[in-house]
Image: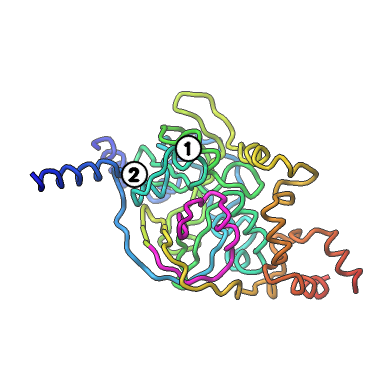
Amino acid sequence: MYRTVLASLALSALAALPAQAAEGKRIEIKGELIDTWCYFSGVMGGPESVVGTAHHTCAMWCAAGGIPVGLLGEDGEVYMVLKLPKDDESNGGETFLTLTNDTIEAEGMHYKRDGINYLVVSEVISNEGIPNKTHEDFGVIPGNTIPKSIVKEVLEEG
Amino acid sequence: MFKKIIAIACLATMPVHAQEGAFAEGSKAKSWNLTAQEKARFTARVVDVLCELTGDCAAECGKGTRQLGLIREADGALIFPTKNGQPLFTGAATDLQPYCGKTVEVDGLLTGGDEITSGMSKIYQVQRIREVGGEWGRANRWTKEWAKKYPGAKGKGPWFRRDPRIKEEIAKDGYLGLGEEQDKLFIKDLY
């Protein structure tokens, strides 16, 4: 009887899952949280110019706009972040916005489906802030990121 | 299942150059001159990606909070839409949300993928969407939804210059994310 109840519960749980729930793998990974649209589409230039400080403000615009945030791992792969610890608001959510371009070390579950990597982060082990100083090579991308009024104000300060 | 096998078999027998545009037929997607850009129009079921992959499901696909995906009818592939049709730094999930769990027809562009990261599939930009057999609509509702959410952020300029969360982050960490002093040094050096 006990086994029958357990089996029924297990079947119920399975029935609630989507038909093709993927096999996940627990990983630890380090990388930068990036704007995936600009990185892959080339809409603002090569991938090396749309990461780090050069693209930080634009990456915030994109994260707030609901463009998926990805983790660019040290292995060169991009992992689409579907969840941060206790925060599943991957469509423009607060935590995703505030972490853009930070380099983090994270633990979580990695899923790969139809050629795309996905990451469900269970813990952010460390956060280095933004060590990727790409503005030294690329300025800001796009070029009008900093409003003219701010530029004028700073230059007038002397 | 049988339909899926037939579709996969048909795709597998096509020459490589034809596979590159396997879903381009009938597409009216506008060019954005993107990396490895490819027109793609197909029917698909709208899903909550987190739910689809992990079983961590939320009511109504998260009611606009989560990223949504497209399970393409022809081959069962999970296509990841990352952009809507507006040239305004806006994603696709908000435009797909009203169709959670439904089968839709979408038209747009595939981009990136293997050209950027070896072995990776392309991501998708949705330009038009409709329920199968329904009227086409443009994937451009993001800014309307934003305006409803932030009624106090009215004013001149695009949404991203007025968004209170972004303004708060810039006030805290500057445009480079390194603080106001670094911004000033950068501006003085560059201009």
**Helix or strand or loop: what does disc 1 sit on?**
strand
Residue B122 is inside the magenta segment: no
Q: Residues within 10 Å of mark 2 (few under 14, many from 20)?
A: some
The answer to whether residue B80 is left or right of residue A12 is right
The answer to whether residue A1 is visible is yes
| Residue A46 point in image, percent of width and height | 60, 64
Closest to the observer: B100 or B130? B100
Tell me which amino acid carries mark 1: Arg
Residue that extends furthest to the front in the rendered view of this protein: A2
In this orientation, which residue lies closer to the viewer: A100 or A47? A100
Q: Earlier in the sequence, mark 2 or mark 1?
A: 2
| Residue A71 rendering spot, x and y as whole percentages | 49, 64
SS state under label 2: helix
The residue range painted magenta reads A81-108
Residue sitting at 54 percent across and 71 percent down?
A103
Q: Are marks 2 and 1 on the same chain?
A: yes
Check if residue A87 falls in the magenta segment.
Answer: yes
Query: Residue placed at 50% from the left, 66% from the top?
Result: A72
Which quadrant holds the N terminus of chain A? top left
* Numbered circle sitting on residue B41: 1
The correct choice, above or below, for A47 with respect to B5 in the image is below
Chain to which the residue tagged by mark 1 belongs:
B
Residue at 66% in and 47% down:
B88
- Mark 2 vs mark 1, foreground winner is 1
Q: Which residue is mark 2?
A: B11
Q: Which quadrant would residue B183 be assigned to in this image?
A: bottom right
Point out residue B94 in the picture as x, y percentages from the top left corner.
55, 41
